[in-house]
Image (cartoon, helix red, strand yellow):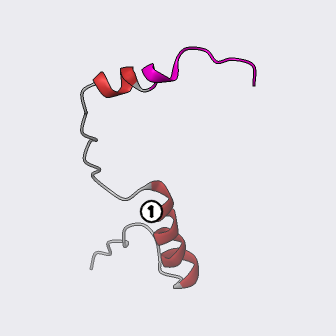
Amino acid sequence: MAGSHGSLTKAGKVRNQTPKVEGRKRKGLTPSLRNKKNYKKRIIREMPTGQPEFRRG
């Protein structure tokens, strides 16, 4: 390679100066895990979906 775009002694300078920010807490499952869970429930075990019907009488 012919040359570089800046000296290697300055590599990572900005990233090292940036303050660390904690990630936010996730409230539920990730979409892929939620889809996997729903697939098992609906297709594999053939459980009914939705709310049960309310019958009077």
Q: Give the quarter of the figure containing the N terminus.
A: top right
- Residue under numbered circle 1: 34
What secondary structure prevails in the magenta region?
loop
The foreground one among 47 and 32 is 32
| Residue 11 placement, left or right of 23 | right
Does residue 41 sit above or below 9 in this rendering? below
| Residue 28 placement, left or right of 44 | left
Q: Residue at x 25, y 33 (%)?
A: 21
Q: Give the quarter of the figure containing the C terminus.
A: bottom left
Which stretch is magenta?
A: 1-11
The foreground one among 23 and 53 is 23
Q: Residue at x 32, y 27 (%)?
A: 16
The foreground one among 56 and 2 is 2
Residue found at the far top of this picture: 6
Where in the figure is residue 28, as x and y percent of width and height?
A: 32, 56
Residue found at the far bottom of this picture: 45
CA neighbours of label 1 inside 10 A, class few (<14), some (14 to 19), many (20+): few
Count of number-bearing discs: 1
Q: Residue at x 37, y 73 (%)?
A: 52
Q: Residue at x 27, y 52 (%)?
A: 27
Residue found at the far right of this picture: 1
The type of residue carrying mark 1 is: Arg
Does residue 11 sit above or below 52 in this rendering? above
Where in the figure is residue 25, as x and y percent of width and height?
A: 25, 47
The foreground one among 24 and 54 is 24
